[in-house]
Image (cartoon, rainbow, N blue to C red):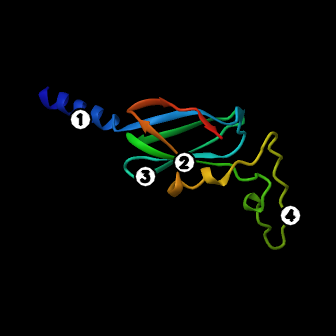
Amino acid sequence: MGAAMLLIMFAGAGCARQGDVTGKVTQNGKALVWGTVQFEGSDHLIKQGNIDPDGTYFVEGVATGEAKVAVSSINPQSADFQQRRGEGRPPPKPRPVVKGWFPISEQYSDLSKAKLSYTIKGGQNKFDIDLK
């Protein structure tokens, strides 16, 4: 029984080394409707989540400690997101318009030059990100 308790304690301690992060991304109070949020945890692993149309995001399993944060919101109509046309196939349908999309400064999209950082704790973390 003692070994089982020890195993449970170590398993619980491993979970405390990571946290899940939720929040809302805005720019000057206006919700971003498209994009991604990246966290580079203290273990230098990058975890990413999508930004939902209401501006909310969820990133799972970020290492505890100081984390760099990047936000990207590339134009959803750009060629980066267009499907390629296969030979002998009809052209792909255009992507639907993402209503309410607006560009943000590229300064927020590069983790190596991160302007944002947060301290991640084990368990649930909530960080609303307001880009200036």
Label 2 sits on a secondary structure element that is: loop
Sequence-first disc among 2 and 4: 4
The quarter holding residue 19 reads top left
Sequence-first disc among 3 and 4: 3
Image disc number at residue 91: 4
The answer to whether the residues at label 1 and label 4 have Cβ atoms under 8 Å apart is no
Eye-nearest disc, 3 or 4:
3
| Residue at 41% from the left image edge and 30% from the top image edge | 123
Sequence-first disc among 1 and 4: 1
Q: Amino acid at mark 4?
A: Pro
Which residue in the structure is indicated by mark 2?
Answer: 115
**Mark 3 vs mark 4, CA separation in Å:** 38 Å
Label 3 sits on a secondary structure element that is: loop
Furthest toward the left, the residue is 2
Seen in the picture, residue 52 relative to 106 is either above or below; the reply is above
Eye-nearest disc, 3 or 1:
3
Seen in the picture, residue 32 relative to 70 is either above or below; the reply is above
Image disc number at residue 45: 3
Which residue in the structure is indicated by mark 1?
Answer: 10
Q: Which quadrant holds the C terminus?
A: top right
Which x, y percent locates residue 74?
71, 53
Q: Residues within 10 Å of mark 3 (few under 14, many from 20)?
A: few
